[in-house]
Image: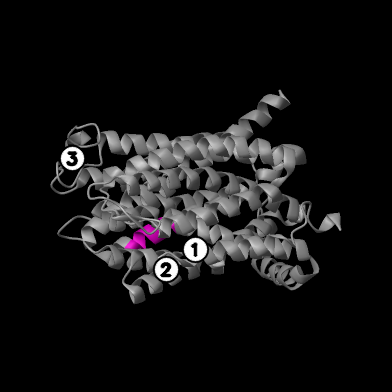
Amino acid sequence: MAGNVTRKRIWGWFFFDWASQPYNTLLLTFIFAPYVNELMGDGSRAQAAWGFGIAAAGFVIAILAPILGALADTGGNRLRWIWGFSGLYVLGSAMLWFAAPGDFNLISTLFFFALGLVGMEFATIFTNAMLPDLGRRDEIGRISGNGWAFGYVGGLIALVLMLGFFAESATTGATFLGLAPALGLDPEMREGTRFVGPLTAVWYVVFMVPFFLWVRDPRSQSAPKGAVKRALTDLRGTLKRLPETPSLFAFLASSMFYRDALNGMYAFGGIYAAGVLGWSVVDTGVFGIIAIISGALFAWLGGKADTRFGPKPVIAVCILVLTAVAIGIVSVERDALFGIALPEGSRAADYAFWLFGATIGAAGGVIQAASRTMMCRQANPARMTEAFGLYALAGKATSFLAPLLIGVATTVSDSQRIGVTPIIGLFVIGLVLLRWVQPDGDRAE
């Protein structure tokens, strides 16, 4: 019976990745971002605006994430926090329906997009903090990898549904399958593509049901009196003691840079392809399918590699691969590839970008799952939610900086290709800092 209960808890935990993945897949990268590019009609301007909007959300997450994590460790009941932030996720994504052509308000669109993104990121802090409770130390890597792979499958199915039945081409008004948008949605008003917001919200509501039914938080006590003050005091103490835990400090710093670079790839991949290669929403969606299938497969394989070799070498290999891809992306133009001119009508640039997408999906899924495992090894077990709050801070401290750098670089250069070059430097810094990370944390010293 105990084994069945544990398996249910693990599967319930997996369902958070399944339920939340469409925010990344459909909104952040492959459907909504290219649609914003279409509405604005200027790739460089759209990329800059997207960067500044995500930077604002990242700033809020960076400031509040460690505080919320510390408060949850002090006050308990992480599930209550997940309920609350789930509400922000659903509201923010659903409101994107109103980003209509002819009545497009960039500020309100970015506000609601950022609201949903903040909800997803904060809910993720508390679900990640539950990972050590799901299995033995030698099982955590496999569980994390399987969860990430399961989430990719959810994102893939949601993307296929959008492309096949809802997201219409701006020129033909038909979906990828040649159909009119389902539910009688008006293609002239781009209602099929705009439906990505409500679909993301409904998907989350439906598939979080197993999570809330099967996952139980062992720290479910009510918050004691003075919990906020105690949480802030504990957080200050943790931050002051970080230099005393050099491995944890180095990992947080390393992940701050390489995860931000990866997030930059995700956030700007779709809008970059739309602006530089002239891809439609449907073209970008097909690119997404390739990336997600690759990501699901390699996240599963990466979990096995994590279990066998440990997370550190897995992370290092992924950083090297992603750095090479970032350099390659900057070298892709519609009429040239790696500086070599292409004949008119050549699809070589498209094929190269599809290959890059598959590689980003593969290495990206693996590195994120392995990073969760590494955080479990580095953190104090008694302060796990606070640790994942710091982990979120590390992921977002430059998460508002990287989109800001991309926004500024794109604005100054008026070039999308030059605008994404900060990603390369962030990966290199992350790899250098990883050398000071101990595989089993400071306890190993």
Task: Give the structural element (helix, strand or loop) at label 3.
Answer: loop
Q: Tag 1: residue type?
A: Ile
Residue 183: in magenta span: no
Using the rendered image of the protein, determine whether residue 373 is visible from the camera's viewpoint.
no
Task: Give the structural element (helix, strand or loop) at label 1.
Answer: helix
Q: Tag 3: residue type?
A: Leu
Packing grade of label 2 (10 A; few <14, some 14-19, many >=20) is many
At 31% from the left and 72% from the top, the residue drawn is 414
Which residue is disc 2 drawn over? 406
Which residue is disc 1 drawn over? 423
- Residue 37's image quarter? bottom left
Which is more toward the observer, 168 or 228?
168
Which residue is disc 3 drawn over? 185
In the rendered image, the residue lying farthest to the bottom is 412
Principal SS element in the magenta part? helix
Residue 360 in percent (x, y) is at 49, 48
Rounded to the nearest angstrom, the CA distance separating label 3 from label 2 is: 35 Å
* Left or right of 52, for residue 163: left
Residue 115: in magenta span: yes
Q: Quadrant of the C terminus?
A: bottom right
Q: Tag 2: residue type?
A: Ile
Rounded to the nearest angstrom, the CA distance separating label 1 from label 2 is: 8 Å
* Left or right of 368, for residue 28: left
Residue 68 in percent (x, y) is at 60, 62
Does the residue at mark 1 contact the one at mark 2 (Cβ under 8 Å)?
Answer: yes
Task: Give the structural element (helix, strand or loop) at label 2.
Answer: helix
At 54% from the left and 68% from the top, the residue drawn is 398
What's the magenta region? 110-117
Residue 168 in percent (x, y) is at 21, 42
